[in-house]
Structure formats: structure tokens, C-alpha cells
Amino acid sequence: MIPVTRKPEPDNFDRKVRQPGLRFLAENPQPIRWQNREYWQQALSDMRHAYDSICAYCATWIPHSTGSHSIDHFVPKSQAPWMAYEWDNYRYVSARFNNRKGTQTIVDPFELSSDWFLLDFTSFLIHPNPELSSAEKESIWQTIAILRLNDDEDLVVERQTYFTDYQENQTSFEHLQRRAPFIASELIRQGYV
């Protein structure tokens, strides 16, 4: 996970998402079901564009043709329905990580510093920066566990493949910056670039 800069709300967001959502919430302030009221889906293509198709949780590119992208409500709808239609509560993520997070609390990519999550280029596992406080490290370990950032073999192999392709000159550093920005930032931090 890397820091993500919050992008501005699109001009048409209020009309397409917030206003229909607020009308629904005025009639149903504590909804149990959101079926046919998922107005946030109207913002999915705007989010893809704003965040360059990079998953906020795994920091890799979500392919347009085969990737399953989604909007995570960082503060879950069940806990804060009034935030269900607010741009600032959305995180552009792969559906895989959205499902894993569910209603659990993780570190917010909008709030973290660039050196909180580190990558070990021998195991390709992620760990917290040892210089962080105990509470910060615990939050990072919890985030890693909830999202299964080290337990998802496909994800670990993907990190290794990006690194190997770069080491063998099969991909450029610029490509890594666009498709795997966490790996690119770790290459810089660890002196590979």
C-alpha cells in the first residue's frame, strides 16, 4: 500500500450520485438493502480515470478488460449510511480487496506516509517499517492480514514478476511506476534505481 492523493469530486457527481442518494436516504435513513440504489456505481469510471486504474489497497493496476474494479466505502455503509454517496468516502479498489476488507477497519491510503509499508525483495512479502510506533505497526499488520497482502499467492507472485521483469530489462521503470507504483517506490527507497 502506498499513499494515495485524494482526487477532486467530478463536476457531475452531485447530480449523478449524491442527490439521488440523498433522496433515497431521506426515505430510508438506515437502509438494510441498497439494491437499485447503488448510485456510487455511476462514479466508477470517474474513479478509474482519477486514480489511473491503480487499486488503492494493493497498489497495482486493475486491467480494464479482465480486472474487476469497484468502489469501497472506506467507512462502511452499515456504519455510516449518510456517507454512502460521498466521494471522499470512496476508494478505487479491486473487487477482490473490497470483499476482503468488508466492514473491517484498515489503514487509509489517503492518510498514510510513504514509508509505512515496506517490501522485502527476497520474499516479496510486505511488512511495516520497524521505525514506526507499536500502534502504527499493529495497524499495518492488521491491514496486511485483512487484505491478505502476504497470504494471496497470486499477489506475491505478481510482485515478484514485476521485480524480475524489471531486473531482466523486460520492462521499464516508467512502466512499473504506471502499473505497480508500490514496487517502483520500493525500488527507489532500497537503491535499485
Image: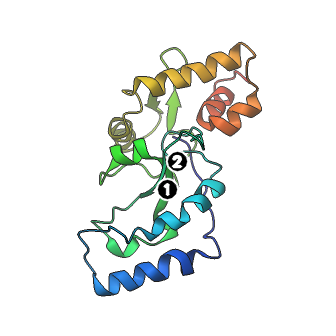
Residue 59: x %, y % from top left: 55, 40
Image quadrant assignment for residue 186? top right
Question: Residue 9: which disc?
Answer: none
Using the image, determine if residue 179 lies above or below residue 34. Answer: above
The residue shown at (52%, 31%) is 118
Q: Secondary structure at mark 1?
A: strand
Using the image, determine if residue 134 lies above or below residue 38. Answer: above
Asked if disc 2 and disc 1 are in contact, CB closer than 8 Å, the reply is yes
Compute the Cα span from label 2 to label 1: 6 Å
The coloring applied to the image is rainbow
The residue shown at (37%, 62%) is 75
Residue 110: x %, y % from top left: 52, 55
Q: Which residue is mark 1?
A: 91
Q: Residues within 10 Å of mark 2 (few under 14, many from 20)?
A: many
Residue type, label 1: Arg
Using the image, determine if residue 101 lies above or below residue 188. Answer: below
Residue type, label 2: Ala
Using the image, determine if residue 120 lies above or below residue 143. Answer: above
Residue 55: x %, y % from top left: 53, 45
Horizontal side of 112 relative to 101 (left or right) equals right
Image quadrant assignment for residue 64? top right
| Residue 132 visible in the shown view | yes
The residue shown at (30%, 86%) is 27
Which mark is first along the chain, 1 or 2? Answer: 2
Q: Which residue is mark 2?
A: 56
The residue shown at (62%, 20%) is 163
